[in-house]
Amino acid sequence: MGITKILIIALLIWVAFKVYTSLKSRTEISNDKMFNRKIIACDFCKTHVPIASAIKIHNKYYCSIDHSKNA
């Protein structure tokens, strides 16, 4: 009877761990979507930058203010 209790407890711990890791990965995926991590190329130097930090002028994206002025 003692080995059965140990096996049941081990199984419950394993199931709890699987549920926890599954929920954690879903949260990370939704955080990525929330921050919109799309990457674009600078129209001047073709360096890839996140769209959130790019500078948009006349429907073109640049990696810095200097490149937006030079283009």
Image: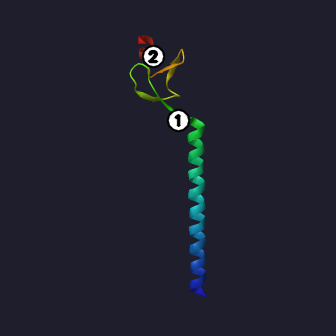
Type of the residue with mark 2: Ile
Q: What is the quadrant of the C terminus in the image?
A: top left
Question: Does residue 41 appear left or right of residue 22 in this picture?
Answer: left
Residue 56 position, x and y percent, is 52, 19
Q: Count neighbours of disc 1 (C-alpha within 10 A) and say few if under 14, some if 14 to 19, many if 20 or more.
A: few
Q: CA distance from mark 2 to mark 1?
A: 21 Å
With 42 as the anchor, is 34 left or right in this view? right
| Number of numbered discs overlaid on the protein picture | 2
Q: Which residue corresponds to mark 1?
A: 37
Task: Depth check: give the residue in front, 52 or 41.
Answer: 41
Quarter of the rendering containing residue 35: top right
Q: Quadrant of residue 47?
A: top left
Residue 65 marker? 2
Which residue does the image show at 54% across and 18% down from the upper left? 59
Residue 16 appears at what percent x and percent y?
A: 60, 65
What is the secondary structure assignment of the residue under circle 1?
Answer: loop
Callout 2: few (<14), some (14-19), or many (20+) C-alpha neighbours within 10 Å?
few
Q: Are marks 2 and 1 in contact (CB under 8 Å)?
A: no
Q: Position of residue 65 (x, y in %)?
A: 45, 16
Q: Horizontal and vertical percent for residue 69?
A: 44, 11
Asked which secondary structure carries label 2, the reply is helix
Residue at the (51%, 28%) spot, across then down: 51
Residue placed at 57% from the left, 46% from the top? Answer: 29
Q: Nearer the viewer, mark 2 or mark 1?
A: 1
Which residue ends up furthest to the bottom in the rendered image?
Answer: 1
Depth check, front residue: 41 or 50: 41
Amino acid, disc 1 = Arg
| Residue reaching furthest to the left | 45
Q: Residue at x 57, y 79 (%)?
A: 7
Image quadrant for the N terminus? Answer: bottom right
Left or right of 1 on screen, residue 70: left
